[in-house]
Image (cartoon, grey):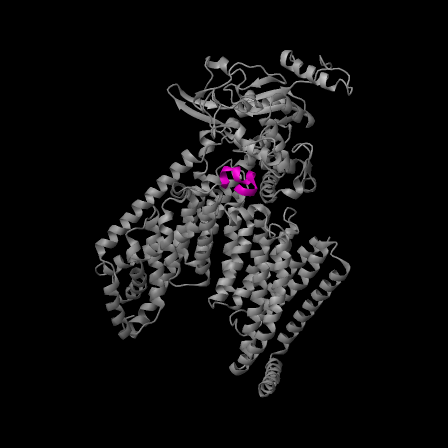
Amino acid sequence: MAREKSSKDNAQALFHSLRSAYAATPVNLKIIDLYVGFAVFTALIQVVYMATVGSFPFNSFLSGVLSCVGTAVLAVCLRIQVNKEFKDLPPERAFADFVLCNLVLHLVIMNFLG
Amino acid sequence: MAAPETSTAAVPTLHTNNTVRNAFGGVLSFFILLLIGVLAFSIRLFSVIKYESVIHEFDPYFNYRVTQFLTKKGIYDFWNWFDDRTWYPLGRVIGGTVYPGLTLTAGTIWWLLNSLNIPLSVETVCVFTAPIFSAFASWATYLLTKEVKGAGAGLTAAVLLAMVPSYISRSVAGSYDNEAVAIFALIFTFYLYIKTLNTGSLFYATLNSIAYFYMVCSWGGYTFIINLIPMHVLLCIVTGRYSSRLYIAYAPLVVLGTLLAALVPVVGFNAVMTSEHFASFLVFIIIHVVAFVYYIKGILSPKMFKVAVTLVVSVGLAVCCAVIAVLIALVASSPTKGWSGRSLSLLDPTYASKYIPIIASVSEHQPPTWPSYFMDINVLAFLVPAGIIACFLPLTDASSFVVLYIATSVYFSGVMVRLMLVLAPAACITSGIALSEAFDALTGSIKFQLPGVSTDAEVDAGETSSDTTEAQNDEVKAEKPEETSKDRRSKKSKKKEREHVERPSAKAKVKTKAEKKRLLALPLEASAVSLLLLIVLGAFYVVHCVWAAAEAYSAPSIVLTSRSRDGLHVFDDFREAYSWLRHNTDVDDKVASWWDYGYQTTAMANRTVIVDNNTWNNTHIATVGTAMSSPEKAAWEIFHSLDVKYVLVVFGGLVGYPSDDINKFLWMVRIGGGVFPHIKEPDYLRDGQYRIDSQATPTMLNCLMYKLSYYRFVETDGKAYDKVRRTEIGKKYFKLTHFEEVFTTHHWMVRIYKLKAPKNRIRGKTKKSKSKTSSSSSSKTSGTKKKNPWH
């Protein structure tokens, strides 16, 4: 009983600390996080759709899901590079790399979409 | 730096000296790289000089034919090409079953040259593609090793790769096969991966994915990359080397790489459905989990983090188990657990001989012998362990990748001799690292002990070298060098001086460092002698590589030569036979032969074949194998049902050519027997021994292969002595009933037979009726015994 209560307390304390720590992140990083969440959500919708309707044509499904996952991954990479850890990398360079990689990704997606 | 006052005065001149030395080093390494490229190109030209500019072997002829089609018809027709001139009557979808990288590369080069009005023929471009790409591969090795250890190691590795016999064997001028461009793509992809890992730049990650796409286009061995890189990522995570650069290096590669791999028609949906790729997805999930954990760890306090861990572990474990159970059920439901036959035979070396005799029958798929290691990578076999140790001093992400690469490639090369080719770049990289470290140590010791040269600036130079010296004292004596060592030595010592001059150090520190170094440096004479020995052994390596390139690996195998007292004999029988077929048969005639010669027949004779080297349909090959193992009438029936007009056999008994069809015959029996159970291998063996002399079994003496090979052979020397099997043959005088000989080449190496047309009327055959069936069948059998209806 006491253990359960303390674990519940722990969970609440954890949740609070997470929330406060996250609220402290800069706004531009939060925007990127929002974008990542949106991309993952879109991918999940596509998977659910495929589960209900069937996987034909498979290449369209694959390109749709992988484009969502790909943009999520690239946005995470951008977030990593813009963060204070990479001191000597100018954020403009990080963003330019991000745009280039997205360009290549979407070129491939357009080709594979069918 | 002895004292601050002198150092501030000395630094500007030292600085300009170092800039000049840097510039000199840069120019020197540029010229060395250029020379390495020229060396890699020229060492592969022996076959062009000794024979002619011709395409070698069997597989390159198929690639050549596809390239011809591409240059003639254009890329859209090439993508949609359905080839009806092979695997008659099935045909083959070329667009969907060929790795297009090589043909597209050669086609692009040809188109580029032609648009510049340099009229090279397609054949010339095809023949010289491999040497050009081997030059690129050695430059890529330089870049890769430079990322791992430094420019000196890079140059050493590049020159080793330019000459290593294993790579030469698959990339001589004329060996127009997938590996010619695939090895360059492999090394370049690894270089870009290591570069991304070292810099953390998304730009290089994009380039890495594009290079991986080029590798997928070129060779089936791309599965090696997509399994090695996840393994390395896992290794880095497990050894605590996770960093955000690792995430940037790996995650975009998986997504983009899978998409790009799915774009290539021959891979298609296999990129997400076969077990070869599952490792990459698994590690993709793992790296996301690890990244998330690190992120949470970064924003929480340690106490809260512990709470989070306990919470997550309890919940996450249940979810994990469920997911893994589902995955395992999915994978286990397929009989091969999702792996293709070729990959399974790599993981379990005994798999092919038990289940897929065709894969087991290819000589390239046999395990290598110990001497072949020394033949193929020579001196590097001794240097690799030293290089592995050097990779651990210090251990970086890049050097751990090199260690993993060499370990896995050594295992796979032990399974299949063809994969010695994947071992070659790894061996060159590690040996290059070992050699350059050895040179560092030895030259540092020499420099330290030269009188009047050792200033305090060199003290630091000696110090780092002595650290490595201590670790490599034992390996020094056993290591070997090469010719351009002098240039490299001076360049490296200059580079080190520059590094150490700029490093600040206090006076007191210098004193203890100097003492420590004095204890660790090797004696002057020992260093000089070791240096000399390394250079001599490098000379041995070079001599062996040039010999291997000239004598062992430059035979085009479509033209054979032999030396005798009378001079040089040239055996050009294959091309003689193919051009006979080309000029003396109809365009639509079908030719049956064993699958080895299919590609050459379609490319050079331009006739439709039944089976060829692609070996995708085992039953079709078994049909041809059964026909070759059956008596004449049964074989005639089989071939007639396939619309075959001509049968081609290769026979080496007159001249002693050992790779002829009689030597391959047991494989025909095995493969045919695997599908048609009435063909049993023991029927063809006398007491377990394969013989064709008078002691051979009657089944053997009556089979089609025996008859077609030895028909009229007794007319050559009166005794019918087979020079390959070294006996006289069993049945010497016989006539062919269902086939007629139409062409035999000059040295009897290729023999072409035509199927006789069925007779209009068969003597002795009566109307079919129930009461008379027994009498008619008995009269028919007696008819065939006494009067042969086919004559």
Residue B27 can be seen, yes or no: no
* Quarter containing the C terminus of chain B: top right
Residue B471 painted magenta = no
Q: Is residue B772 left or right of residue B709?
A: right
Magenta span: predominant SS is: helix
Residue B53 can be seen, yes or no: yes
B128, B470: nearer the viewer: B470
Farthest residue in the bottom direction?
A2
Q: Is residue B789 above or below residue B381?
A: above
Q: Position of residue B624 (x, y in %)?
A: 61, 30
Query: In the rendered image, which quarter is residue B510 located in?
Result: bottom left
Q: Position of residue B23 (x, y in %)?
A: 40, 57
Q: Position of residue B329 (x, y in %)?
A: 63, 59
Query: In the rendered image, which quarter is residue B561 located in?
Result: top left
Q: Which residues are magenta?
A: B353-365
Q: Position of residue B9 (x, y in %)?
A: 31, 70
Q: Is residue B493 left or right of residue B722?
A: left
B181, B732: nearer the viewer: B732
B517, B691: nearer the viewer: B691
